[in-house]
Structures are given as C-alpha cells and as structure tokens.
Image (cartoon, rainbow, N blue to C red):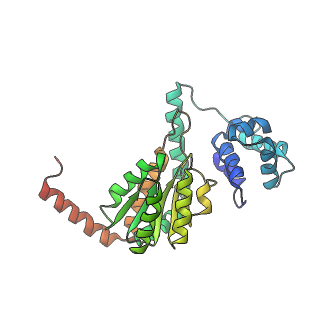
Amino acid sequence: MNDAVLDLFRGVRLTPTQRRIAHSLVTHATAAAYLSAAEVAELAEVSQPSVTRFAMALGYDGYPALRRRLREIATAGNGTPAAAGPAGTEIQRAVRAEAANLRQLADQLADDQRVSTAGALLAASRPLPVLGLRAAAPLAAYFAYFAAKVLPDVRTLDSGGSLLMDRLDQAASAGASALLAFVLPRYPRETLDALREARDAGLAVVAITDSPVSPATDHAEVVLPAAVGTDLVFDLHTAPMALAMVLLQAICDAAPAETQRRLEAFEASAARRQLFLD
C-alpha cells in the first residue's frame, strides 16, 4: 500500500512542509485514509491550511478528494478494508513492521539500476566521505567500517559543528568526487547544510534516506529510500542498514579486481597479526 501512496507524490515538486505531510501519509497510510485534515495536520505537525494546499498541489480540489483516493488505495480495489497485520504484542508488531519494510526494500531492488549507478559513483571517489549525523551516525560508521576493507580512503563524518564543513572541503581538495550521506528522521539541519556544501564543492551526493519525499531529495543525484520503523519509542533502522550493505556490494561490483586485491591483502594482514580466533 505504501508504494501506491508514494505514487501520488512522484514527479511533484513539494515544499519542505508538504514533504512532512507526504511522509506522514506514507508512514501512516492505512490510518490516514480515515483522518480529517485537522488530524493529518496534527500528525505531521503542520497547519490545517497546509494540508489543504498540499492536496491541491497534487491536483485535487481539496483534502476530501485526496482522502477519497487514499481510501480507494486502502481498500485495495476490492471494496473491503486492507487486511490488518497479525495480532500480537506491541514489540511483535514493531518487528513485523520491520519485516514489511525489508520486503518493500526487496521489491524496490527488483530494478537495481539506481543502486548500480550509486555504486559506480562512490567506487570512483578518492577519498570517499561518508556523512551521518545524530541518529544516522551509527549507520555511517557501520558502512565505513566495511567499506574501508575495499576502498583506500574512507572518511566518516559523524559529528557536526564548524569542523564538519572543514572536513568536507578537505575531502574535496584531496580529490573526492562523491559523498555518501545517511539522512534519517528527524533530519538534522546540519546534515542538509552539509549536503549543500558538498554540492557547492562539486561532489555528487548519494543519499540513503527513509522516503522518496525526504528533504535529502533536493540535494542528491541519487536517492536510495529505505523505510524506518516507527512503532517503538525510537526508530528502527533495519532496512537502511540492509540497503547500506547492498550499496557496498554495488561498490565492490563496480571495481571487482581492486576489491579482490584489497580483501586478499586484508586477510593476509589479519592472519599475520592473528586478529581473529577463527
């Protein structure tokens, strides 16, 4: 169902406020089909007139017309409400929602052209800066740890402040041609500022983010969406983490000979230093 809701927004230039509304509708697709404009506004933390303008930006006369379309999607075209997920505890429902996010990601990857394009861009960058602030910092570190085994110079940018822009400029001066950015809710302002700085410095931006309508889409050449789980107190990032490893595979596939050479060198070094028990 989320894909059908996303189709409503494809090709439409949305303001940041409208992206917030779109993100809320995607995240709460089934429930949103039965909410009033005021309730959607509360969900997205925007004003009610913003919801009306959002519906009109999509080509509808107003929010009631958009809601009718959302209800059509929710009933899956057969006149009955979409089936609810299996019952269970709150934690079970959250884990099942993550499984659904992974299934959605797998469906998206049926066409892997965007991932292949992103992999080629990142494989060619020397050095490769990897940006992730606040909640996205662990994902940036996770990706960079493994990427460093197959790329000669991976630079993790996981802290903000004035030094962040310095490190971006230094990467560009050292020859970087691309930047990988993890952009996850609640979208730190510093992250978007850094993406603008990266573009100004001539870097191609690849963004792993939670939605095709996230703020990262305005600043990236390639956007790779993977939904986050929102059923617990803090977000679950299972799908973005899986997508990070899929992207690293694409980087390896873009330069297989160099990948093999560097992996063999690492294994020889690890054996010599007895890094692992096995």
Residue 222 visible at all: no
Single out the residue that lies furthest toward the right: 61
Front one among 3 and 244: 244
Whether residue 191 sits left or right of residue 246 in the image: it is: right
Where residue 41 appears, as percent x and y from the top left, is 74, 40
Q: Is residue 75 above or below residue 117?
A: above
The residue lying toward the viewer, choosing from 28 and 161, is: 161
Q: In which quarter of the image is residue 177?
A: bottom left
Give residue 257's quadrant in the image. Answer: bottom left
Vertical placement of residue 134 versus 120, above or below: above
Query: Is 138 on the left or on the right of 267, as rendered?
Result: right
The location of residue 96, given as percent across then percent down, is 52, 35
Judge left or right: residue 250 versus residue 105: left
Instruction: Give me the residue at 33% from left, 66% from top.
Output: 153
Is 27 placed above or below 214 here? above
Q: Which residue is drawn at 65% across and 47% down?
A: 23
* Residue 173 image position (x, y, % from top left): 42, 74
Q: Give the residue furthest to the front.
A: 162
Q: Position of residue 137 (x, y in %)?
A: 43, 50
Q: With respect to residue 276, does 89 lie above or below?
A: above
Q: In which quarter of the image is the N terminus?
A: top right
Residue 46 seen in this snapshot: yes
Q: What residue is shown at x 45% (from left), y 69% (from top)? A: 169
Q: Which quadrant holds residue 225?
A: bottom right
Tally the marks: 0
